Amino acid sequence: MKLATMFQAGLPYLVLTGGLLVVMIGVAIKRTHAVAAVLTIVTLIATTLSHIVAYSALGDGAVQIDSMFKIDGVAYLFNILFLLAALVVAFLGSEFLNRRIRFKEEFYLLLLCATLGSLVLPAAVHFASLILGLEIVGISLYAMIAYPEKARPPLEAGLKYLVLSGVGSTALLFGMAMIYAGSGSMEFANSLPSDGSIEGQYFYLIGNAFFWSGIAFKLSLVPFHIWTPDVYHGAPSTVTAFLATVSKGAVFAVVLRYAIEGNVLDSGNVQFALSVIACVSMVIGNLLALLQTNLKRLLAYSSIAHMGYLLIALLIVESNSALGYETLILYLVGYFLMTLAAFGVVSVLSMNQEQELDSIDSVCGLLWRQPIAGAVLIVSAISLAGIPLTIGFFAKYYLFYAGIDGGMWTLIGALVVGSAIGIYYYLRIVFTAIKRPAEDAEAMTGLPWTGLGILAFLGLCMLVFGIYPTNLINLIQNVVQASGF
Amino acid sequence: MNVLVLILLLLGAGVVAWFSERVSTKLPNWIALITFVATTLWVLVIWFNGPDAAGLYASLRHEWIPRFGIELHLRVDALSLMLIGLTTFLGIIAVVSSWTETKTRHGFFQFNILWVMAGVVGVFSAFDLFLFFFFWEVMLIPMYFLIAIWGHEDKEYASMKFFLFTQISGLLMLVAIVALVWINYNISGTLTFDYFELKNANLDSATARLLMLGFFIAFITKLPSVPVHTWLPDAHTQAPTAGSVILAGILLKTGAYGIIRFVVPMFNEASQEFWIWGMSLGVVSILYGGYLAYSQTDFKRLVAYSSIAHMGFILVGVYSFSKLGTQGAIITMIAHGFSTAALFMMAGALQERLHTREMSKMGGLWVRAPRMGAVTMFFVVASVGMPGLGNFIGEFLVLIGAFQKSVVLTVFAAIGIVVAAVYGLSLMQRSFQGVPNPDVPKMHDFAFREMSVMVLLMIALVWVGIYPQSLLQMTAPLLPGLLD
C-alpha cells in the first residue's frame, strides 16, 4: 500500500487530531469559551467533510494500515455518524457551559478526544487498536461525566464509571491475553486457535468469555448493566447523550468487525452466550424501565434493552455479514437520533435551572408549555417504541428482518415481549407530555434557540427518515457492498 | 381518482385545521367538516362513474423502498371503495357530533380526527403488506391522542389499554408479514411485499397455519372478538363522542376488512381448516357480548358491548366460506357502521346534557326530548335487526351462509338476535321510557345540527335495508378472488 494512499485514507483522523491540538493550544494561550466552541465545531465539521476526500482513496475495497487498522467505507459511515452526534453534543454543550462560571474550555478537549477514540474503533482490526480506541473514549468520559465539579451526583457517577469501566477493561485485556495464548496473534483475522478447530480449546473459550464480559460491561448488557442508571443519572444530560450514543455505537462497530474477521460466532458456545445475554437484556432492561420515575434512569434502562436488540445485528453476521452491518448502521442512526433528542430535551429544559429537570413529572404538559421540546420528546418516545412515521419503526423492522433471516426465533420472541413492555413506559412519557399542565406550571420561556433548533432538527430527521428512508437505506446498502461484505 | 391525493388531502387538512385554531376556535371544525363533505362527494362521484375494466376505481403503484421490494401500492376495488365511502361519511358524523363537545385545543382535536381517517383510508386501499402495516399503525397514534387528551375520567387507563392491545397484536402481525416475505423470497427469489405475489406463495401447510394465526390474532383484537375484546368497552366509554364514533364505526371495520382481505384469501387452505374456530369465536362473541351488554348500566358501555356481539356475526359470516356469508359480513360492516355511530352520538349527546352515562339516572327522557327518543328508537330497532333496515340484511345473509356450514353454530348465532332484542329494548326502556326521573335537569332536544346528521344516517340505513342489491352487485365480482 502506498504511503500517500494511507495518508489520504487516514485524513479524517489527522484532521481531527490537528483540530484537537489547535483547540488545546488555543486554550493554553487564552481561555475564551466562544473561540473554543467555534474551533471545536469547525474541527468536527471539517473532519466530517474530510471523509469525502478520503473516500476516493479506498478504491474498491479497504486500505490496510499496518496490521492495526483497516479503513473501509463502513468505518467511514460509522465515523460520520459519530461526528454528527458529537456535533450535536458540542452545540448542546456550549449552551450548558454558558451557564457555568469557569473551566468551560476543557469540555471541548475531552469531547474531541472521546470522538477521536470512537473514530479509531470502527477501523480497528487488532486487539491493540481496539483497546487503544476504547481507552481513549473511556478516559475522556470519566472526566466528562464528573465535569460539574462541585455537585455530588456527577462525581459519584464519574467514580463509579471509572472503577467499573476499569474492571471491564481488565476483563477485556485478560480475555485478549488468553485468546492470544491460544492463537499466537493479536489480529482479529488470526485470532482463532492455531490448529484451526475450536473444539476443546479452553484458552480460546475462556478468553472469549472474559472478552465478551468486558464488552458487555461497556455496552451495559445484562448482567453487567448495574452501573448504567446511576451513571446516566449522575452525569450532565449533555454528556449522558454522548455516553449513551457514541460510546455504545463505537463498541458495537468494533465487535462486529471482530465477529466477522475473527469468525467468533463459529463457536456455538459464544453464540449461545450472546443469545442469552441478548434475551435477558431485552426483557430485564424493559422490565426495570417500567419502575422508573426519573426520565434519565428510564432512558438508561431502555438503552439496556436497545443494546440487547442490537445484539441481533451482531448474531446475524455469522450467516449474512452484509445484513448485519446494514442492520447495525440503520439501527444506530435511529437510536442516535432518538436518544440524542430525548437527552437533549432534558438538557435544554434544564438550562435555566439549578438542578436538572429529569423527573417524569417535570415534563408534565410539556407539549403545551414548550411546544417544540414537547413535540420532540413525544416523537422520540414514539420512535423508541418503534411505531411508524418515525425512524424507530424501520430500525425495528430491520431487526425483525435480520432475526428471521437468521432463524433466531427465540430472539424474535424476546424482541416482541420486550417491545410490548417498552410501549407501556414510552407511552407514559407521551401521556405525561400531553397532559393538561398544572395550574401553577409556568410556561417555559427563555430557553436557548440553538438548543431548541437542534432538537427540532433531530425531531424532523426522525420523521423524514421514518416516512422516506429509501435514500438512507440505499446509501448504507451501497457502502456495505462496496466494502466487500 | 388518485387515492393518494385523498390521503394527502386529509393529512393536509389536518395540519391546516391545527393552525387555523389561531384565527378562531370554530374554524378547525369547519375545515374538518368541509374536508369530509368534499371527500364524501368525491367518493360518490367515483362510485357513480363505475369501475374500469379490471374492476378498479383507482390504483397507484410506485417504488418506495426498493431494497426490500416495498412499494407504494394503492388499489381501490369495490370493497375498498365502500369502506372508504363509509370512512369519509362517518367523518362528517364525527365532526358534527363533537361540534360543541370539545372545550380545549380544537385545532389539535380535528387534526387527530383527520389523521385517523387518513390512516384508515390507507389501510382500506393498501395492497402492499408493508404499506398496509404502516397505515395500520399510523391510525393508532391519533386515536390514542383522541382518547388520552379529550377522554373522560379514566382516560389514562383506557388509552393505554387500547394502545397496548392493538400494538402487541400488531407486532405479531409484523413478524408474520416479514416471515411470509422472507419465506417467499427463499422460494421464488424475489423480495416483495406485494399482495398478489404473496397470495400465490407456495407455503407448506404448517407454516401457513402459523403465519395465518399471526394475522388472525391482530385482526380479531381489532374486531374485537372474545377473548381479546376487553380493551373495547374501556376505550369506548372513555373516548370523546367523535372518538367513539370513529372507533366503532370505522376502526373495528379495519379488523373485519383484514380478515376478509388478507387472512382468508392469502392463507386459504389454512383458513378453511380453521373455520370451526373462526365461527365458534364469532358465536361466543355474539352470545357473550350480548350477555354482557344486557348487564351494563352505562349507556355507552352497553352500546360498546353490543358492538362485540355484532362483530361476532362478521366472523361467523366470513368463516362460513360461502358467498352469502361473506356478502352478509360486508353488509354488516357497513350497516353496523351507521347504526352504532348514531347510538354513540346519542350517548355523547346525553352525556353532554345530563353529565352522566348511567341509565339509572335517566328514565322517561322521551317526554323531555321526543326527537331524541324517536331517533334512539329507530337506531335501536335497526341494531336489533328489524327487517327493512341494513343490519337485518347483513345478519340474515350471514345466517343463511352459515347454515350451510354448520347448523348447530347457526342456531346459536341466531339466538344472538334474540339476545340483541333483549338488551336493545332494555336500553330503550331504561333511558327513554318509564317514569320520568325527577332528578333529571331540563334538557334541550336535538336541534337542526344533530337532527340533520341523524336523518342522513337513517337514510343510509334504510337504503342498505331496502336496496341491498346495490351493494351486493358491487361486491359480487370480488368474491371469487376473496374466497379462493
Image: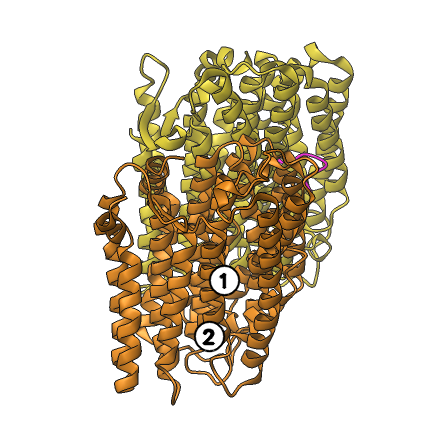
Q: Position of residue B85 (x, y in %)?
A: 41, 32
Residue at (64% x, 33% y) in the render: B217
- Badge 2 marks a residue whose secondary structure is helix
For the residue carrying disc 1, how many other residues have a C-alpha within 10 Å: few (<14), some (14-19), or many (20+)? many
Foreground residue, B51 or A441? A441
Q: Earlier in the sequence, mark 1 or mark 2?
A: 2
Q: Is residue B111 left or right of residue B468?
A: left
Colour given to chain A in the rendered image: orange
Residue B396 visible = no
Mark 1 — on which chain does it sit? A
- Return the residue at label 2: A144
Q: Nearer the viewer, residue A139 or B172?
A: A139
| For residue B274, side relative to residue B145 (left or right) | right
Colour assignment, chain B: yellow
Highlighted magenta segment, given as a residue range? B223-229
SS for dot 1: helix
Please identify the quarter of the rendering in which residue B180 is found.
top right
Label 1 sits on residue = A244
Give the colouring mode of the picture: by chain
| Amino acid type shown at disc 1 | Ala
In the rendered image, is residue B466 in sight?
A: yes
Q: Is residue A245 magenta?
A: no
Instruction: Check the picture and name the quadrant holding the N terminus of chain B.
Output: top left
